[in-house]
Image (cartoon, grey):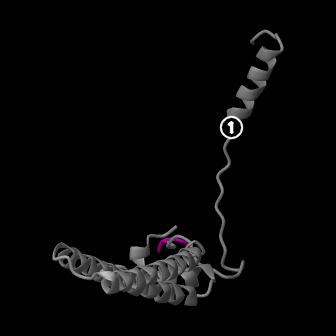
Amino acid sequence: MLDINLFRQAKGGDPAILKKSQRARGLPEEIIDEIIQLDNEWIKKSFDLDELKKNANKIQKEITVIAKQKGDVIELTEKRKEVLNQCKDFEAEKDNKQKERDELLGKVGNIVHESVHVAMDEVNYFNTTSHHTSTHSKNRKRIRSLRHGHQRT
């Protein structure tokens, strides 16, 4: 699976290279845009979740100060519970975005190297093969005969 930072321009990634690779494979490049969009939504959800957690911590500090002064903390406690419930919802949404993003990310192949011949038909396809004899089959025959008690020659 490709690193998500390859899709993030802010982290030095270049979506144009990824799109070029998709074209070279004959696959749609829109998946790259979808991954980037889902990743941006995931980043926003993560930021919003962090802000909610900060708010919950701030409320907890207020509760602690008021409780030390023997004040009424019921209203603040309820407010904190609401914020924590929102945190759970945001966490679930964030996890769903991450799951969707990673699912699409798994469908994108490695970047096609520039030296790779790209052709969508067999007219321009070239194949080079090398013919060599393998000692593997000779060794298998020798091992098989030794197992059955034959003399080595």
Q: Quadrant of residue 12?
A: bottom left
Stretch in magenta: 113-117
Q: Is residue 15 above or below residue 111?
A: below
Magenta stretch, main secondary structure class = loop
- The answer to which of 90 and 74 lies nearer the viewer is 74
Position of 123 compared to 77: left or right?
A: right
Check disc 1 and report the residue beneath it.
134
> Looking at the image, which residue is at 47% across and 89% down?
37
> Looking at the image, which residue is at 53% across and 88% down?
34
> Looking at the image, which residue is at 33% across and 87% down?
75
Q: Is residue 113 visible?
A: yes
| Element assignment for label 1 | loop
Q: Quadrant of residue 53?
A: bottom left
Q: Is residue 139 above or below residue 73?
A: above
Q: Is residue 16 visible?
A: no
Q: In the image, what residue type sits under mark 1? A: Ser
In what quadrant of the picture does the C terminus appear? top right
Mark 1 residue crowding within 10 angstroms, few (<14) / some (14–19) / many (20+): few
Position of 96 compared to 17: left or right?
A: right
> Looking at the image, which residue is at 34% across and 80% down?
77
Count the marks: 1
Please check the rendered image and state whether residue 115 is part of the magenta-colored stretch, yes or no.
Answer: yes
- The answer to which of 36 and 142 lies nearer the viewer is 36
Q: Whole-percent x and y of residue 51?
A: 31, 84
Q: Whole-percent x and y of residue 99?
A: 55, 75
Please check the rendered image and state whether residue 71 is part of the magenta-colored stretch, yes or no.
Answer: no
- The answer to which of 153 and 120 lies nearer the viewer is 120
- The answer to which of 7 and 132 lies nearer the viewer is 7
